[in-house]
Image (tube, rainbow, N blue to C red):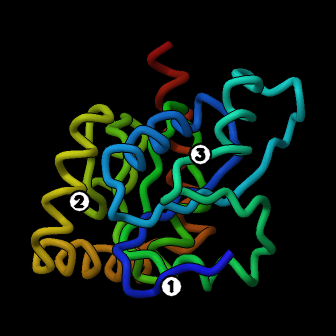
């Protein structure tokens, strides 16, 4: 379906499952009807996906301002990042998502749930939020204040220069070893 380039656009990406925070993303869409929300990715595990029944209903009949285009080819994903004003990943799990790197590399501002993993690896380059209501209020501020959004864009640009995939893989590896040591 066609997207409106002039509307403030929020992109999310990942497998459609509850631990990726998809329901929070849907909640944000409901609370911000003027904003265009897009979530790329599919049901990797089909009906085995946790929360599948609820998620499938939403994907089939999302709010008007939210679309689920499905799994997008990596080369085409660049177009989605370029169209987005903000990348939000409300994931609950401590796995480093490549989508965040892709957002950085396209200089797309990033908002993430506050997780220790992100803090230890990419602190300072993204906007952290504790829960969906905080994400909602931060989103509202960014829509109202282009300067703040621009600062986040600059952070994304700095991050893209600082983190290559190989560099991040090493940091990530160290993080996990450190966590395992704490265990």
Of the 4 image quadrants, the one containing the N terminus is: bottom right
80 or 180, which lies in front? 80
Which residue carries the number 3 mark?
173
User: In the rendered structure, which disc, 1 or 3, sits on the residue that comes first in sequence?
Assistant: 1
Which residue carries the number 1 mark?
82
Q: Which label sits in the foreground, 2 or 1?
A: 1
The answer to which quarter of the image holds residue 9 is bottom left
**Residue sitting at x 20%, y 81%:** 150
- Mark 3: give few (<14), some (14-19) or many (20+) Cα within 10 Å: few
Looking at the image, do the residues carrying marks 2 and 1 touch, with CB atoms under 8 Å apart? no
Q: Which label sits in the foreground, 2 or 3?
A: 2
Rounded to the nearest angstrom, the CA distance separating label 1 from label 3 is: 30 Å
Q: Secondary structure at mark 3?
A: helix
The answer to which quarter of the image holds residue 147 is bottom left
Residue 164 visible (yes or no): yes
Question: How many numbered marks are there?
Answer: 3
- Mark 2: give few (<14), some (14-19) or many (20+) Cα within 10 Å: some
Q: Which label sits in the foreground, 1 or 3?
A: 1
* Residue 131 against residue 37 in the figure, above or below: above
Rounded to the nearest angstrom, the CA distance separating label 2 from label 1 is: 22 Å
**Residue sitting at x 76%, y 23%:** 53
Position in image of residue 118 (x %, y %): 39, 46
Q: Which mark is residue 124?
A: 2
Q: Secondary structure at mark 2?
A: loop
Rounded to the nearest angstrom, the CA distance separating label 2 from label 3 is: 20 Å
User: In the rendered structure, which disc, 2 or 3, sits on the residue that comes first in sequence?
Assistant: 2
**Residue sitting at x 32%, y 53%:** 32
* Residue 155 against residue 47 in the figure, above or below: below
Q: Secondary structure at mark 1?
A: helix
* Residue 15 against residue 165 in the figure, above or below: above
């Amino acid at each position: 379906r066609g997207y409106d380039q002039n509307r403030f656009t929020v992109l999310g990406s990942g497998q459609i499952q509850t631990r990726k925070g998809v329901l929070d993303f849907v909640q944000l869409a409901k609370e911000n009807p003027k904003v265009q929300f897009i979530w790329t990715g599919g049901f990797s595990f089909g009906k085995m996906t946790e929360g599948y029944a609820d998620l499938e209903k939403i994907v089939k009949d999302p709010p008007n301002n939210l679309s689920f285009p499905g799994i997008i080819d990596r080369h085409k994903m660049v177009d989605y990042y370029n169209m987005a004003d903000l990348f939000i990943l409300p994931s609950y799990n401590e796995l480093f998502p490549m989508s965040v790197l892709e957002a950085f590399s396209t200089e797309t501002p990033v908002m993430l749930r506050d997780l220790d993993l992100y803090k230890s690896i990419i602190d300072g380059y993204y906007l952290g939020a504790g829960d969906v209501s905080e994400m909602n209020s931060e989103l509202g501020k960014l829509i109202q204040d282009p300067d703040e959004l621009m600062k986040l864009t600059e952070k994304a640009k700095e991050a893209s220069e600082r983190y290559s995939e190989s560099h991040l893989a090493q940091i990530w590896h160290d993080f996990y070893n450190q966590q395992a040591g704490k265990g």
